[in-house]
C-alpha cells in the first residue's frame, strides 16, 4: 500500500496510529506530499482531486481517502476492532471521531491563518473562532475522559491526535490547567507505542 | 428527534435528503440554528462543542454529529440501504462521500472568505485554492458520472448536495460547459423528490 504522507499532518497521524495498533505500519510505502490549501500538490491530485493527505493507494490500485475512510478500511481489512459494529456504541464512538476531527480541522484553519496567509490578510477573529472550537471540545473532553478507562479505539485515537496537534502547533495554548482530567488521560494515552512512534514533526 | 437545522447548509441537506429517501423526514423537529465560524451559536454548542449543523438529538437524548455519522445512523436505524456493508463497494462509496464533502467544505471556505471576513482581510488566492478543489472534483465526477446509472446511495446523495451548494452560492461558476456528463447526471438526480424538497434557501 502507498500512503501520501506528511509527518506534520494530524489526519495522517490518525491513520498511522491505527496502522501501528494493527501491527501493519511497515506495510506502507510512504509517498512524499506537500498538501497546501493554496499551492496544491499535483502528485496527490493525480489520485485524490482534493489534493489532501492522507490518501491511500491499495495494492489493487483502489484509492481511498479521507482519514476516516482509511482508518475504517484498515481496521476491517486487517482484523481490528477499533470501530464498534452498528449500534449505540458505534454512533457514540463515531461522534467522538467527528468532534476530534472537528477540533483538529479548526486548529488547522487557525494555523493556516498565520502559516499560509500574507500578514495584511490575517484576521484575529478567525483564529479566535477556530480555537474556540478547540477549547469547547477540550471542555467536553474533561467530562468524558474520566470514563475512557483503557479504551483504545478510533474515538480515543482521534482525540489523542487532536490534542497532539494542538500541542505541536499551538504550544502557547495552555489547556492543561483548566482541563486536568483530559491532561491526565492524554499523558497516559501518549505513552502507547503507536503514539510515541507517530509524534508530529515538521 | 431534534435536528439543529439551517436551510442553506449543504451538510444539513445531505441528512435531509437521506431522511426523505428513508421516508422519515417528518419525524424531525427542526431547531433554528445560526452556525458561523466566528460568531458561534451557543444553542448548538450546548449539544455539540463544535457549534456546527447538522447536530441530531435522538429521542433518548443521545447527540450525534457530524453529517456522515447522522446519515449512517439514520440509514441503519430506519432500515435503509444507502451505505454498502463492509467490502470494496463500501470503501469506494465512502471515498466518494469524502470527495463530495471535501468539495462542499472547500466551497464553504470560499464562501466564508467574502461572507464572513472584513474586506481588507480577504485573500483571492484562498478563494482560488478552495474552488480549485471543487473544479478538480467535478473533473473527476465527469469521468465517474456516466457509470452512476440510477444509483441512489450516500455517495450520489453527497455529490448531489455538493453540486447543489456550488450552484446555490456560486451561480457565476459555470461548471456545466466543461463537464457535460456531470451536468446530465445532476439534472436527472435533482428531479428526485428528496432533492426537490431540500433545495437550499438562505
Image: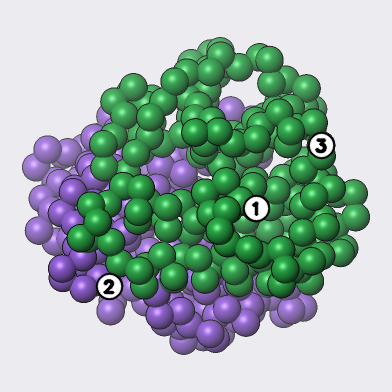
Chain colours: A purple, B green
- Give the residue displayed 55% in from the left and 80% down from the top: A44
Chain designation of label 3: B
Residue behind mark 1: B163
Question: For numbered disc 3, what is the local secondary structure?
Answer: loop
Residue behind mark 3: B192
List x then y, in percent, for residue A100.
39, 47
Along the horizontal axis of the image, is A52 left or right of B73?
left
Q: Residues within 10 Å of mark 3 (few under 14, many from 20)?
A: some
Rendered view: A64 above or below A180: below
Looking at the rendered structure, whether the residues under marks 3 and 2 are on a common chain is answered as: no
Nearest to viewer (mark 2 / mark 1) = 1
Q: Do the residues labelled 3 and 2 touch (CB within 8 Å)?
A: no
User: Which is more toward the observer, A121 or A132?
Assistant: A121
Looking at the rendered structure, whether the residues under marks 3 and 1 are on a common chain is answered as: yes
- Give the residue displayed 25% in from the left and 70% down from the top: A117
Q: Residues within 10 Å of mark 2 (few under 14, many from 20)?
A: some
Amino acid at each position: 500500500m502507498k500512503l501520501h504522507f506528511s509527518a506534520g499532518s494530524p489526519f495522517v497521524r490518525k491513520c498511522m496510529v491505527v496502522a501501528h495498533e494493527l501491527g501493519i505500519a511497515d506495510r506502507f510505502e510512504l509517498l512524499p506530499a506537500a498538501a497546501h490549501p493554496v499551492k496544491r500538490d499535483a502528485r496527490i491530485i493525480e489520485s485524490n482531486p482534493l489534493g489532501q493527505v492522507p490518501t491511500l493507494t491499495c495494492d489493487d490500485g483502489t484509492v481511498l481517502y479521507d482519514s476516516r475512510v482509511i482508518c475504517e478500511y484498515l481496521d476491517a481489512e486487517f482484523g481490528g476492532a477499533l470501530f464498534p459494529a452498528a449500534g449505540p456504541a458505534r454512533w457514540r464512538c463515531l461522534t467522538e471521531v467527528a468532534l476530534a476531527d472537528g477540533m483538529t480541522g479548526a486548529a488547522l484553519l487557525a494555523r493556516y491563518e498565520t502559516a499560509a496567509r500574507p500578514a495584511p490578510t490575517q484576521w484575529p477573529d478567525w483564529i479566535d473562532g477556530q480555537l474556540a472550537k478547540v477549547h469547547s471540545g477540550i471542555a467536553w473532553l474533561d467530562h468524558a475522559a474520566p470514563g475512557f478507562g483503557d479504551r483504545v479505539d478510533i474515538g480515543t485515537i482521534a482525540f489523542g491526535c487532536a490534542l497532539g496537534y494542538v500541542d505541536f502547533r499551538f504550544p502557547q495554548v495552555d489547556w492543561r490547567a483548566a482541563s486536568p482530567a483530559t491532561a491526565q488521560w492524554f499523558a497516559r494515552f501518549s505513552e502507547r507505542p503507536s503514539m510515541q512512534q507517530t509524534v508530529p514533526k515538521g
